[in-house]
Image (tube, rainbow, N blue to C red):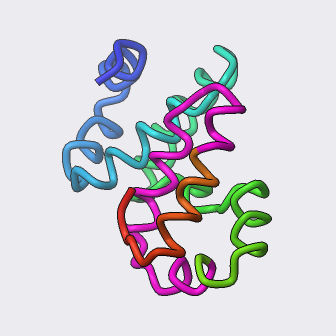
Amino acid sequence: MPADLRDAFAADGKAKAKWADLTSIARRDFLSWLDSAKQEGTRKRRIEKMCSMLVVGKRRPCCYTIVSFDLYTALKARPKAKVLWSDLTGIERRDFIAWMEAEKETAVRKRRIEAACEMLASGKRRP
């Protein structure tokens, strides 16, 4: 767990208790959403929002499963990949998105999107 999130949970016992009740996949989704912040200010706001979301009972970040415009465009251009994307489970989609978004460099992310479309077009359900 990142130190800044640990500090936030130390200050908010209710959020920490709700965090402990999450599944490992839900925790991964929150951490991935947190790590995708590019600026320190955004990260701090997300930690605050995460704590408040947990306290009110939210079990996932609100926007984690939204498909990026780059992925949407790539899938639109490859109908075979788009069909398999539509058939993926939520967990399989999150795995692809996490793999694509794990890279901070835009050019590498775009290459991963292209690779994901190739994998999907060939029937592969995991990156």
Residue 89 on the magenta span: yes
Residue 72 on the magenta span: no
Q: Where does residue 56 sit, x and y in percent of width and height? A: 45, 55
Q: Residue at point 57% right, 33% down?
A: 36
Q: Residue at point 44% right, 59% down?
A: 94
Q: Is residue 59 left or right of residue 74?
A: left
Secondary structure mainly formed by the magenta segment: helix
- For residue 55, above or below residue 10: below
| Quadrant (top left/top right/bottom left/bottom right) for the N terminus | top left
- For residue 34, above or below residue 20: above
Q: Where does residue 127 sit, x and y in percent of width and height? A: 39, 56
Q: Quadrant of residue 58?
A: bottom left
The answer to which of 99 and 64 lies nearer the viewer is 99
The answer to which of 98 and 43 lies nearer the viewer is 98
Q: Where does residue 91 sit, x and y in percent of width and height? A: 36, 67
Q: Residue at point 36% right, 19% down?
A: 11
The answer to which of 94 and 106 lies nearer the viewer is 106
Q: Residue at point 58% right, 57% down?
A: 62
Per the rendered image, the range of residues in magenta is 82-111
Q: Where does residue 70 sit, x and y in percent of width and height? A: 76, 54
